[in-house]
Image (tube, grey):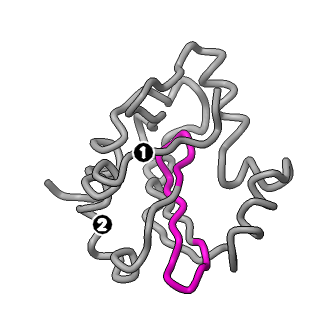
Amino acid sequence: MELIRRFRADQYADALSSWTWLDRLAEMTPVLTNVFGDVFLQARDGSFWFLDVVGGRLDQVWSDAAALQADINDPRVQDEYLMVGLVQAAEAAALVPRDGQVLSFKVPPVLGGTLDAENVELADFVVSVKHRWSDT
């Protein structure tokens, strides 16, 4: 299974529309997503940020595209941002996202959900990200 997913600009815009409480998000451009719908964004200064949709955090992690690429290619870092082990377990359980889909937690880890394939399901990217932290 591919570890990186890309979506259309309108899908990103719709998915992130309920995240306006993160002030800096409006100044960034989504560039890619991991299989769980976490979004990698580029700021105007060229730095890259990571939106953890499960944890509800937006953090500047990389100074530029080269630093992001180096981490994405580093097996020691991949599990933190791409959740490789859990993606492989989901794939073994026949949970493979199709176009427009991501993996999602049935019960988010921040609410006590487990980090295993039994707590993972297929979900529409926009719906999963948009409603993760919204009250609508």
Residue 91 at what x, y percent from top left? 62, 20
Q: In the depicted view, which residue is nearer to us: 69 or 24?
A: 69
Residue, far bottom: 45
Identify the image quadrant of residue 123: top left
Is the residue 67 above or below the residue 97 in the image?
below
Q: Give left or right: position of 122 versus 47.
A: left
Q: Give left or right: position of 105 versus 13.
A: right
Residue 16 at what x, y percent from top left? 31, 60
Q: Nearer the viewer, mark 2 or mark 1?
A: 1
Q: Give left or right: position of 10 versus 108.
A: left
Return the mark for residue 132.
none
Q: Give left or right: position of 96 versus 78.
A: left
Q: Helix or strand or loop: what does disc 1 sit on? A: loop
Q: Which residue is mark 1?
A: 7
Residue type for callout 1: Phe
Q: Residues within 10 Å of mark 2 (few under 14, many from 20)?
A: some
Q: Quadrant of the C terminus?
A: bottom left
Q: Quadrant of the N terminus?
A: top right
Identify the image quadrant of residue 21: bottom left
Q: State which tag comes first along the sequence, 2 or 1.
A: 1
Residue type for callout 2: Trp
Return the mark for residue 19.
2
Residue, far left: 136
Picture residue at 53% right of the left edge, 21% below the top: 96
Picture residue at 56% right of the left edge, 13% below the top: 94
Picture residue at 23% right of the left edge, 58% below the top: 134
Number of numbered discs visible in the structure rendering: 2
Q: Residues within 10 Å of mark 1 (few under 14, many from 20)?
A: some
Q: Which residues are magenta?
A: 32-48
